[in-house]
Image (cartoon, grey):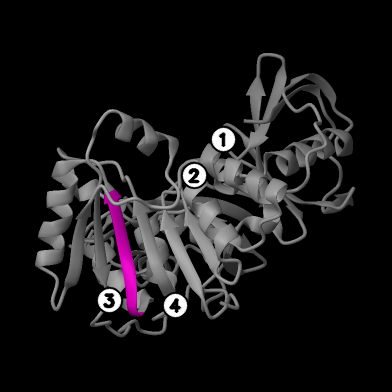
Amino acid sequence: MPHLILSSYSPPSLPTTYDDVEFLWRAKGEKKELWGTAVGQNAYLFNVVPHTHGVLVKSDKLTRSSDIEELKRVLRTFARVTNATVYADNIPSKNRPPLADSQMAPDAACAGYPWPSRVALEIGFGSGRHLLWRAKESPEILFIGVEIHKPSLEQLLKQCHLQGITNVRAVDYDANLFLETLPDGLLETIYLHFPIPWIKSPGRNIFCWQLVDEARRVLKPGGTLELRTDDRWYLGWALEILADTPHAFFEVAKDRNIEVMSKYEARWRRQGKEIADVIYYNTHPVASKRELRSMSFDCELSFTEVVRRLAAFKPVIGPDYLLKVGSAYTIDATSGLIPLIMGSMMRPEKRYLLIHGGNLSYYPTPPLCTRAGYQAHRKLLEIVKGEANEFDSSY
């Protein structure tokens, strides 16, 4: 990833703005510093860590963008605003266009994204060949691609720009958790092509009871969930799940020809491997039973009080969620950040709790308001308000 090694640098008075990059605050921890920056609505957090030749400046994983060129630009601006002497870097400018327009934040649904009337979604799009082809064939449909492999995300964003495709949005997040945030009856189709079969750890398979349950809610009446696999075990796994689904209507086809295939599928076909399709039809959609949730803090507390209360608790592990707290970073006497790991046991989220002027908020954004995320938030709120019992048996 892009980084700088600075043999010397002089931090300016903060906050300040340089070349449209806002430098907001500098927080000191035991072993490193955190710098909070922003470009428009996008937050960028940088770690400044001691190095043999000075300090190493790199993006914090929490705000690492798939738009690598924008990240490099912010790093170059960091070097200029601090009058740094650069010992080494890996951020040469290639003058590539910005790619962020095709990205969608995982919390878009929670933030009131204006959904069009026709939306489809692909889980794990890989090279993006299928997703891009669908988008070009049906420009009236918004296609969402959910992927956790960052090189695949960046490649998709590049291809959208090069081919002038404007009806694709890429999301870097766990698909099952992202589906939890979507409105009822939004999607026409969910594509799931060649997922990894976790035979020894079936709980890790993306096709699971939770996926089918959420699909029944987010698919339109008559919408489809389409699985494509070359693995016989995975086929049996999916059929077992669908057989246990109330009112399930689905069909299975073998070696069905589709309009576009990945290079991997083409190779498998040359090798004579069988390809199976399982298509589930949403004939009995279910309505959401989600309660109204808020991920805000309804209290004012001092930085020192929050640090003291959180330090008294060990990691909180509930039946379906977790909450872990790290060591605090100090901005000034009344402000600071505390690292958090919270939410789903399978895909916990990393955030910071920002305390400034008595106000508490998540940085850079609130965790997704999933069931697990909300449970972790409620427990965190109990702890910082002094309402939680350190010996609560639910921990």
Q: Secondary structure at mark 3?
A: loop
The kind of residue tagged 1 is: Glu
Residue 226: within the magenta? yes
**Residue 322 percent location from the top left of the image:** 32, 56
The kind of residue tagged 4 is: Leu
* Circle 1 Cα neighbour tier, 10 Å, few/some/many (<14 / 14–19 / ≥20): few
Mark 2 lies on residue: 327
Mark 1 lies on residue: 30
Q: Residue furthest top?
A: 52
Residue 380 figure quarter: bottom left
Q: Nearer the viewer, residue 302 or 277?
A: 277
Look at the image and give the residue range highlighted in magenta: 221-228
> Measured along the vertical axis of the image, is residue 29 above or below residue 209?
above
- In this rendering, does residue 332 appear at all? no
CA gap between label 1 and label 4 equals: 47 Å
Q: Secondary structure at mark 2?
A: loop
Pointer 1 or 3: first along the chain: 1
CA gap between label 3 and label 4 equals: 12 Å
The kind of residue tagged 2 is: Ser
Quarter occupied by the N terminus: top right
Mark 3 lies on residue: 282
Pointer 1 or 4: first along the chain: 1
CB within 8 Å, label 3 to label 4: no
